[in-house]
Amino acid sequence: MEAFDCRMCGTCCRGTGGIVVGRKDLDRLCLHTALSPEEFAERFAERRNGKLVVRAGADGRCIFFADGTGCTVHPAKPDICRAWPFFRGNLVDPESLALAKEYCPGIHPDIAPADFARRGLAYLAEEGLVGRGGSDEAAALQVKDLQTRLADPGETP
């Protein structure tokens, strides 16, 4: 059983201020959009609590989400988007995971929290998405302290 299979529904693209753009994200997005960092920030982002975040459109979704198309910057999307649904809260808190399962149709409804956490941490490590504690990173990616739990399959996060 897969832990997650993205349905490209855009449900996770709703809200404001959650799509943090770190330095490597900005580099990737600028290359993809052929914009300088300053131009990208001016057109598509804003500063919140000292972090650069992607703006939301009038519909409340990420400015890069388009109905019928999905993410218009998919190959260059920020790490926080690449990591969904394997966010710290969903990895450590079974209640948070249960809420995420109700919200996101791509999370397998029958996956146990411990299995979800193991698979999620492995995915984050394999994809290089574990936060390094940088001030420009999303807190949801700060899972380094959880990686040791992969070594003990019986331990629940």
Image: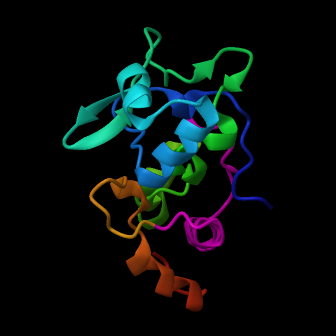
Q: Residue shown at 38%/65% (left/top)?
A: 142
Q: Which residue is drawn at 46% across and 60% down?
A: 94
Q: Which residue lies furthest to the bottom in this view?
A: 151
Q: Is residue 121 above or below residue 101?
A: below
Magenta residue span = 103-130
Query: Residue pushed farthest top?
Result: 58
Residue 148 rendering spot, x and y as whole percentages:
48, 87
Which quadrant of the rendered structure holds the N terminus?
bottom right
Indicate the position of residue 152 as horizontal and vertical percent values: 56, 91
Q: Is residue 102 visible?
A: no
| Residue 27 belongs to the span the image colors magenta | no
Residue at 66% in and 48% down? 107
- The foreground one among 71 and 111 is 71
Residue 142 located left or right of residue 100: left
Relative height, residue 30 to residue 129 (above, below): above
Q: Is residue 118 above or below residue 49?
A: below
Q: In front: 80, or 12?
A: 80
Q: Front-most of 149 and 68?
A: 68
Residue 110: x and y, percent? 69, 55
Q: Position of residue 155 (x, y in %)?
A: 51, 85
Q: Identify the image quadrant of residue 43.
A: top left
Instruction: Residue at 64% x, 65% y: name it.
Output: 127
In the image, 92 versus 71, the foreground residue is 71
Left/right placement of residue 79 relative to residue 109 reads: left
